[in-house]
Image: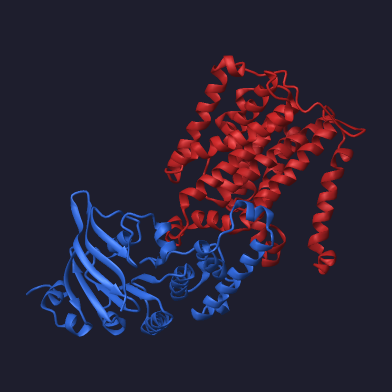
Amino acid sequence: MMLMLDVKEVTKFFGGLCAISRLSFHIEEHEILGVIGPNGSGKTTLFNLITGVHRPDGGQVVFGGEDITGHKTYDIVARGIARTFQTTKLFGRQSTLGNVIMGLHCRTSAGVWGALARGPRTRAEEQQSRAKALELLELLSLSHVRDRQAELLSSAEQRRLMIGIALATRPRLLLLDEPTAGMSAEETAEVVELVGKIRDGGITVLLIEHNMKVAMNICDRLVAIESGEKIAEGSPEKIAGNEKVIEAYLGRD
Amino acid sequence: MADRFTSPKFWTYVFLMALVILLPWMLPGRYYIFLAVMVGIYVILVTSLNLVIGFTGQISLAHGAFYGIGAYACGILQVRGILPFWPALVVSVIGTGVLGALVGLPMLRARGPYFAIGTMCLSIITALVLLNWQGLTGGTSLGGIPGPGQMNIGSLEIDFFSAKTYYYLVLIFVVFTIFVVYRLVNSRVGRAFMAIREEEELAEAIGINAMKFKVLSFGIGALLAALAGGLYAGYMGAIDPEISSIGMSFNLLVMIIVGGAGTMSGAVVGTILLWMLPEVLQAAEEYRPLIFGAVLLVIIIFMPRGIVGRVRAIHPKLAEWIP
């Protein structure tokens, strides 16, 4: 097993508040790792630290053997980490297909001169982009709405599309921020299936999940955090029986 | 490709192009050719501002500043006898483009209304500098700009003092500007611009260097504004700091909003309409500003995406037809 991501003693302060405190964990290649914890425990901040949105105040983030601490987001995406957001974010006025094509930005190269001259290389790149995007829409079961404006899709379709945009960046590691938030049981099952397909396609998945059942269901391993600190780590069964986790979720009598 | 010649869309554009080419011969007098030249210069301005506002989503009120800087740079280089018109135009256009990118670098860190206010200040400062740096700009007006004058290609003599000839010169640059912006927005670069416009956080998350593309858009916008400025200086022969006033930038913004931000044809429609409206309303005499204001208000309330945005929304076929 190869080490995909190694988070070492990462710390982040917002003003005087310690959002993440000396947090360490790792993800192996082809693993699905779940991060669980109550609201405000620092899960999304953790994503922002890994993807370079925030710079950690201490510690290290190592991806595929290389230190990426404090790197710019576009550099981190180019290296192969993609993410989704807790609240749906899309390019609303573009078509479904257009959204996925936008996600191919960092895997294509045409610049201003390429755009103006529109030579054979640029045209070939455009065609390849379209073909790749259509392929992805197939995987996401969104082919039937490919020409529809993204803001007109159903909310479950929008959330799948958001995963599709992230996949278009061709990541080795995909970070999903509560992919099943606000979904019905049926829609949740679809996402669980999709995450399985993504892993089978050779992509490692780090997932924030609020719903314990879903987390238990799809994750190989879980990390539980509370108030920015790791309180438990291990297999879903082990976590489910952990005193501290139960206390963090349900409170003490 | 073969069916291009049978498509009504193709022939519509051929017809419009023919109309534009024959226009100076159909207009009733010199004054109207002057108006047509000004509309052309403004189409360059509004189309390039549309790249920044309509496609990249950055509400810039500095476009008038770059228009003025381009006009003054081109004018001063000629008046001082440093360069003739054509090289002066090239130098001022490239110089203003670089200046735009450099200024954009700190300014584009501000977002939304803060960026608008920052760029508004830039317009005010530019107009003040142009007015008060008399040693360089001549103060209240800079006159005696030679312009392109005459040009000899073989035995062919082109006289740019003729308004009709200048119209065609401007027309070439209008087509150039529309071509540049159209190609840009229909490319990977343009998709990055639109990604930033629609959801900057997501744009960053898919690996777009938002700062780089915002600076690029702003710089190209400034470059094309300077092109319009140079053409204006060469046409009028005299310029004044008013062209960089904040009112100028607001006018351009209104043209974009009325025509339809983020659409290629919206910039053209908005510009033509806002130049024609005062002419049409001449009969109304002192009620002119009142009617003008009422018409604008109606358009903005009932067509928040502009005239072209409204028309495109009627049917998907229309959206395909009108870029």
To which quarter of the image does residue A4 belong? bottom left
Measuring from the top left, give residue A241's x and y in whole percent: 14, 83
The spot of residue A244 in percent (x, y) is 12, 74
Percent of width and height locating residue A214:
30, 81
For the residue pair A172 and B322, the one nearer the viewer reads as A172
User: Left or right of A59: which side holds A202?
Assistant: right
The answer to whether A104 appears left or right of A60 in the picture is right
What tint does the image give chain A?
A: blue
Placement of B46 over or under A74, stated as above or below: above
Residue sitting at the far top: B135
Residue B282 coordinates in the image, percent (x, y):
75, 33
Residue B285: tell me if it is visible: yes
The residue at 30%/59% (across/down) is A49
> Does residue B296 show up?
no
Residue at 42 percent of width and 58 percent of height: A75
Against B147, is B90 above or below? below
Chain B palette colour: red
Q: Is residue B132 above or below residue B288?
A: above
Q: Residue at x 57, y 32 (%)?
A: B65
